[in-house]
């Protein structure tokens, strides 16, 4: 059968090859140049290439890089992507020697190294943003350590706590999320270069040198795994996803708290939009944007991870250019959430009048009345619970604050126990006050001042440790760039 078709088919060109070419230009050209330089230095220092030949290639590489307007390159079908463009230019300028740069490597090990280099930049950027948010929340929690709020369970008023205590819970989750993301970022620090197509090479390559020049901690050992394993992708996006899944729950609380009926969160005018027809409305629209952007980010992370499902354990396009480039959008939308939330939450305040109103209407300190009866009256908790429940029902029916319900309490107490209470009206008011409720909950993790202060100190220390790990990676990457530039420049010298 005669086949007179010519590559590339126009539809294949438009739907696959041209978009991939653009993606490589946008995301990987600089990393590809770095890998070219590092690989050339390694080939020269291991004597796989003669120094004189490596010098010619180095000078020509530098010329190509300086003369090429990458942004204006277009896919014509002549070169699959920027890698083949550079190789073609090397061969055009140097003849057969231009093809020597590709000795002992493959597009397979190059591609996964490119992907890791691109992802580690994004992971480091995300970790920095999350650290900034965490520190802003720690500062806000400290400032709001004594600010009462109504805590809700199952959508109903439950108990009083402080805004600082609520933020502390959010901070702890963020620190755990950072820990997971930091671990995933560490998984990007193992270099695939030297795996070649899938089994390494018969040339005397130095994989440790390549890893060092590219800023990796060490080579990824198994060469088959360098090409087939995608856990560096799935692990990173799974960890990144959780940040926004968890933040989305807090954002939903912000929507609930700022509603007219609850009203305990005040959003400042700078973050409020007014209706075009209803001038009385204050719409905290940034909350909705954070919520939907967080969900978009979760969805984009899921897209990447799910694309790997049921794929073969080998080299495959499913884990490469298209999905890698699509995944970067998760970092874009995630960055918008982190930036907006870092500005939003520290700017908000608690409406004390609404907190007091909701607390009074829902008797949210009633648990401490029951606890007081167990401690001071010697009752069982179930007895105390019955008395507290009867008291709450009575004052709620009268629409009175719990602190005004001493007579209702005394009646309920005598009816349950068969004697008068030893508590006075003053002691009853103290036992049912928000301030007392918070103050007596001074165990580790509680909202009392000392307990919360200790927790905030611990959060700062944990954030410091995570930032130290991030800085160590950044320093390794920066130092590697310096070493590579020096080695490459030395190679160009006579």
Image (spheres, rainbow, N blue to C red):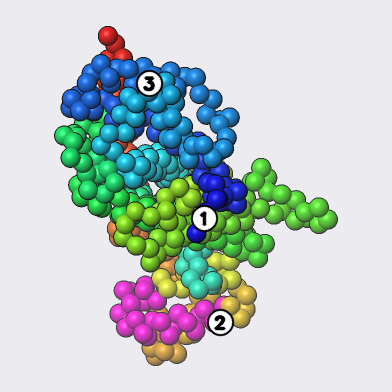
Q: Earlier in the sequence, mark 1 or mark 3?
A: 1
Q: Earlier in the sequence, mark 3 or mark 2?
A: 3
Residue found at x 27% / y 34%: 103
Tell me the distance, in whole angstroms, between the alpha carbons under discs 1 and 2. Answer: 93 Å
Residue found at x 54% / y 82%: 393
Tell me the distance, in whole angstroms, between the alpha carbons under discs 1 and 3. Answer: 37 Å
On the image, the x and y values in percent for residue 6 come to 54, 47
Q: In terms of image quadrants, where is residue 343? A: top right
Name the secondary structure under disc 1: loop
Q: Check disc 1 and report the residue beneath it.
A: 2
Tell me the crowding category of disc 2: few under 14, some 14 to 19, or many 20 or more residues within 10 angstroms, Cα based: some
On the image, the x and y values in percent for residue 363 come to 52, 72
On the image, the x and y values in percent for residue 425 come to 47, 71
Query: Which numbered mark, 1 or 2, is in the foreground of this view?
Result: 1
Tell me whether circle 1 and circle 2 mark residues in contact (CB < 8 Å): no
Q: Check disc 3 and report the residue beneath it.
A: 94
Q: 181 above or below 45?
A: below
Q: Is residue 102 left or right of residue 325?
A: left
Tell me the distance, in whole angstroms, between the alpha carbons under discs 3 and 2. Answer: 94 Å
**Which region shows up in magenta?**
369-395
Q: 265 above or below 69?
A: below
Q: Earlier in the sequence, mark 1 or mark 2?
A: 1
On the image, the x and y values in percent for residue 299 come to 51, 59
Name the secondary structure under disc 2: helix
Q: Check disc 2 and report the residue beneath it.
A: 394
Q: 344 above or below 231?
A: above
């Amino acid at each position: 059968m005669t086949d007179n078709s010519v590559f590339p088919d126009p539809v294949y060109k438009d739907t696959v090859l041209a978009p991939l070419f653009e993606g490589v230009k946008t995301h990987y050209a600089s990393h590809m140049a770095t890998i070219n330089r590092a690989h050339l230095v390694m080939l020269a220092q291991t004597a796989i290439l003669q120094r004189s030949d490596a010098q010619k290639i180095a000078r020509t590489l530098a010329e190509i890089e300086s003369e090429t307007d990458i942004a204006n390159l277009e896919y014509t079908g002549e070169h699959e992507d920027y890698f083949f463009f550079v190789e073609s230019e090397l061969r055009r300028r140097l003849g057969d020697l231009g093809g020597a740069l590709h000795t002992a490597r493959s597009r397979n090990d190059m591609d996964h190294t490119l992907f890791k280099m691109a992802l580690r930049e994004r992971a480091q950027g995300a970790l920095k943003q999350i650290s900034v948010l965490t520190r802003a929340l720690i500062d806000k929690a400290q400032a709001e350590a004594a600010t009462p709020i109504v805590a809700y369970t199952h959508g109903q008023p439950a108990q009083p706590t402080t805004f600082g205590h609520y933020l502390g819970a959010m901070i702890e989750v963020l620190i755990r999320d950072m820990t997971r993301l930091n671990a995933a970022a560490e998984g990007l620090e193992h270099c695939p270069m030297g795996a070649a197509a899938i089994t390494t090479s018969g040339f005397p390559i130095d994989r440790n040198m390549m890893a060092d020049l590219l800023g990796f901690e060490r080579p990824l050992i198994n060469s088959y795994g360098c090409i087939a394993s995608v856990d560096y992708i799935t692990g990173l996006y799974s960890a990144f996803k959780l940040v926004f899944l968890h933040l989305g729950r807090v954002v939903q609380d912000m929507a609930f708290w700022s509603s007219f009926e609850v009203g305990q969160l005040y959003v400042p005018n700078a973050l409020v939009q007014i209706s075009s027809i209803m001038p009385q409305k204050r719409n905290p629209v940034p909350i909705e944007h954070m919520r939907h952007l967080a969900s978009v980010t979760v969805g984009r992370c899921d897209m990447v991870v799910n694309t790997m499902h049921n794929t073969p354990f080998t080299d495959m396009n499913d884990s490469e250019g298209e999905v890698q480039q699509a995944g970067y959008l998760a970092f874009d939308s995630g960055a918008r959430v982190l930036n907006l939330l870092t500005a939003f939450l520290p700017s908000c305040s608690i409406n004390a009048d609404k907190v007091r109103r909701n607390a009074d209407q829902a008797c949210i300190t009633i648990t401490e009345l029951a606890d007081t009866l167990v401690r001071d009256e010697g009752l069982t908790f179930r007895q105390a619970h019955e008395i507290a429940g009867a008291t709450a029902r009575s004052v709620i029916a009268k629409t009175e604050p719990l602190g005004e319900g001493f007579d209702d309490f005394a009646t309920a107490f005598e009816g349950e126990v068969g004697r008068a209470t030893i508590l006075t009206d003053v002691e009853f008011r103290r036992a049912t006050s928000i301030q007392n409720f918070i103050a007596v909950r001074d165990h580790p993790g509680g909202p009392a001042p000392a307990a919360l202060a200790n927790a905030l100190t611990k959060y700062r220390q944990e954030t410091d440790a995570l930032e130290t790990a991030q800085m160590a990676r950044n320093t390794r990457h920066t130092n590697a760039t310096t070493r590579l530039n020096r080695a490459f420049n030395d190679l160009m010298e006579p």
